[in-house]
Amino acid sequence: MPQAALLEERHEQVHRTGTAPCEIACDKESLAGAVSQRACLFCGSRVVLYPIADALHLVHGPIGCAVYTWDIRGALSSGPELHRLSFSTDLKEREVIFGGEKKLKAALLELIARHAPKAAFVYSTCIVGIIGDDLEAVCRGVGAETGIPVIPVQSEGFKGNKRAGYHAACRAMARLVGTGDTSGISPHSINILGDFNLAGEIWLVRDYFKRMGIEVVANITGDGRVDDIRRAHGAALNVVQCSGSTMELAKIMAESYGTPSIRVSYFGVEDMAASLYSVAAFFKDPAMMERTRQVVRAEIDAIMPELKRYQEELTGKKAAIYVGGAFKAFSLVKAFRLLGMSVAMVGSQTGTKEDYQELAEICDPGTIIVDDANPLELTSFLEEKSVDIFVGGVKERPIAYKLGVGFCDHNHERKECLAGFAGMLNFAREVHASVMSPVWRLAPRPARPTA
Amino acid sequence: MSSNPPKYLSTTNACKLCAPLGASLAFKGVAGAVPFLHGSQGCATYMRRYLISHFNEPIDIASSALGEKNAIFGGGPNLKLGLTNVIKKYHPELIGVATTCLTETIGDDVARFLAEYVREVNDPTLLPRIVRVSTPSYSGTHMEGFHAAVTALIEALAEGGEANGTVTLLPGLVSPADLRHLKEIMAEFGLGSVLLPDYSDTMDGQAASRYEKIPAGGTTLEQIRSTGAGRAVIEFSRTLGESPSGGTVLKTRFGLARHRLGMPIGIRESDAFLSLLAELSGRPSLPASLQAERGRLIDSLIDGHKYLFGKRAVIYGEEDLVVGITAFLSEIGVRPVLCASGGKSGHLQAAISAVTEDFLPKAPLVRDGTDFFEIAEEATALAPDLIIGHSKGYHLARKLNIPLIRLGFPIHDRLGGQRILHLGHRGAQRLFDEIVNTVISHKQELSPVGYSYM
């Protein structure tokens, strides 16, 4: 019955653990008519660069792409907030016919004069690729005229999926890296890649690193600053969270500057602690390792009593996960385990084959693993597994609610800090608040088999 | 004609959305319909997210999800595959295909693709109706997209035939609560009517024990077909001008009487609507319940008038909504100091003058084709007491430290945007109470005394 929700072309993008080795197909273009939950290449670029708070982010195209991404992320800044404005060249029919370069140049000059940004990113949208505006040339010219880096982002929506957009964003940032002064950077220094400072998460993580005795050179990109990114090549290590979004930059920096990188996750007690330990281990400094132990111990002690209370009430409940990147899903599976809960379905928009294989290994038998799902598939999986809570983003929320299932927003629009040790406690509170709400007793929930 | 030349070349914080979003919303108001965007996958996803954040409902919009090859060689194959997949999974009665800037720019001939598609299937009688509308995002706003979809639906489906006495009502972009109220009003007058679109159920659904792939509700295809044999069509718009509209199609092709009224917001605009319904239904006066609602409203205007007199308001949003709200504000003693819209029909200035000239000593400043950067600039100089519009004016209200009265679309920072009632005397009552109480509450918060009476 659940297979009925699947279009033929989608069968190989769904796997059930325990049946056979996980050979899931992924990183494909979304299927026409399947109502994918994914956005496009532009979206991937936009979300990664978005939190760089002192840069001008100009979307070159008709109004839609800019207006749908206005103040869209909960990415906080400790200073400038230029990233929260939505700038567009708002192309009209005239420019589509005669070209948009003139308007782009004029808009850039106008906005740079008005806001004095440290750099400008110019995002190309679908039709810019078609009408053939020479973004490189316009950006070079304006850069020379204004004296700031003006960087084109090759983010035409149709040129690939969200993952390809991450790469375009990383290539754009790579043009900044290496242009700043690296003097005075500590040998115990890192860049934080792949945290977007949603609800202040990067501040929490930076605080852990500070207590360990580590200098953070650049936030990439949460609470990000252009000048920090320009000197990021001076850091000893790239600490990379979020599988897809910034790995490409770490690769480029490894090739160009020999900067090593490690992958981490700040979600859940286990992964957060493991991440701090692996960073400490990299620096091979016993004193730092001892400080790290103290940080982890203090943080865990602070959250455990309250966490235990939630654990008692949530034990035995079931969860489903559908998130943007698969790497976050690993941590969520573990975080739910810590709460005594099981995960019956887990999927992502942009996971890789390796991600899904790793997921299949850590999940219980019978877990559904899905790449690039859509509302009807998600609905059928949620109905089949009769879960208590669904973790996803805004587009998944009404699907959960219509099925009488609780919901936790773990996407980039969230306003709750879910990273770090304190974030694990917030996560438990969120899950608890939704699962235990009395409203479900009044809702006409579908029959739930008590298996 | 344009009332003001653009001051800036760049757009900052737009006060408009793109055309395919309006078309998608209109298609959601047709029973058994699935909106389908012919373009990149991102368009559908972004618009779904934008709509979901307001309506809090599952909103499935399909996409032909064009890739690089399709952009070069044409999007026909993906469009057809997408239609087949939507038909397989959703079993829709209608698919509303709207184009995007990508497919308009590469020059896809959607009409030809659809004709081919119908020829290629084994049994065309099993196909849902497919209605197509051209909505490049570089032309017009979401309102042009909305009207274009309504026009396309009527063009494709309306049929003539034996006169059925129906009155067709084309309300434009209003809330599900407004749509429900309009149906109630039509019923009060005993008029057989077709409301198009009607997303009062599909975009404000009930909790149910089964998940509906396509939520129940909406204007049925049969109802849309019947409009051609109706007796009259009413469209709410003072800014449509000569643009194509559903009302114009029904008038020119089927000879229906077309009545264009402003959105029935406030006293006079609602009165005009109800008088027309009285005339069409052959009643000498308003139904008693509506008459009483109007009476209570006027009574309350008197009770609250002193709190509002001379208050200065900035209004923004879709042009027709701005016209309606401005009409109402001028009736209750609030001075509209800036009427702004990202739309640029060319008729905003004249429409604002028409609804305010009897009530305002001086016409308010009107800005069309504008954005929130300009609105903020003007507003700062105008020192308003209130800001009235959708939730994207929040930043401005916060900056000026004055209250924002949320209405229209979108409401992304509060619950219940879909249940905000704007239309009719009942809508005016709700609006009036909210405006007065907001002013009182603001004064109370700032007061060192904290009176517990008004």
Image (cartoon, coloured by chain):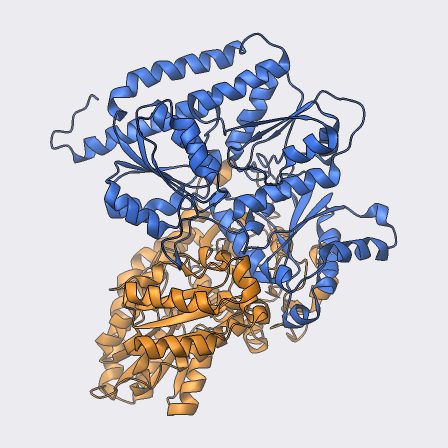
Chain colours: A orange, B blue
Q: In this view, does A26 lie to the left or right of B143?
A: right
Residue A231 screen position, x and y as percent: 29, 83
Q: Residue at x 66, y 60 (%)?
A: B64
Q: Give the answer, above or below, for where B67 lies relative to B211.
A: below
Q: Where is residue A170 in the image (x, y as percent from the top left)?
A: 44, 77
The residue nearer to you, when weighing B452 against B68, is B68
Q: In this view, does B368 lie to the left or right of A5?
A: left
The C terminus of chain B appears in which quarter of the rendering? top left
Image quadrant assignment for residue A294: bottom left
Q: Which residue lies furthest to the front in this view?
A: B1
Numbered circles on residues, count: 0
Query: Could you say where residue B308 lies in the image, as x and y percent from the top left?
Result: 27, 26
Outermost residue, top side: B284
Q: Nearer the viewer, residue A17 or A228?
A: A228
- The x and y percentages for residue B27 are 63, 43
Which residue is painted at 45% across and 54% down in the image?
A: A408
Q: Residue at x 47, y 34 (%)?
A: B419
Q: Image quadrant of residue A230?
A: bottom left
Residue at the limit of the structure toward the left, as seen here: B448
Q: On the picture, is B352 further left or further right than A133?
A: left
**Residue name at image x 16 percent, y 25 percent:** B451
**On screen, residue A286 above or below B423:** below
Residue B174 visible in this rendered orientation of the protein: yes
Q: Is residue A40 visible?
A: no
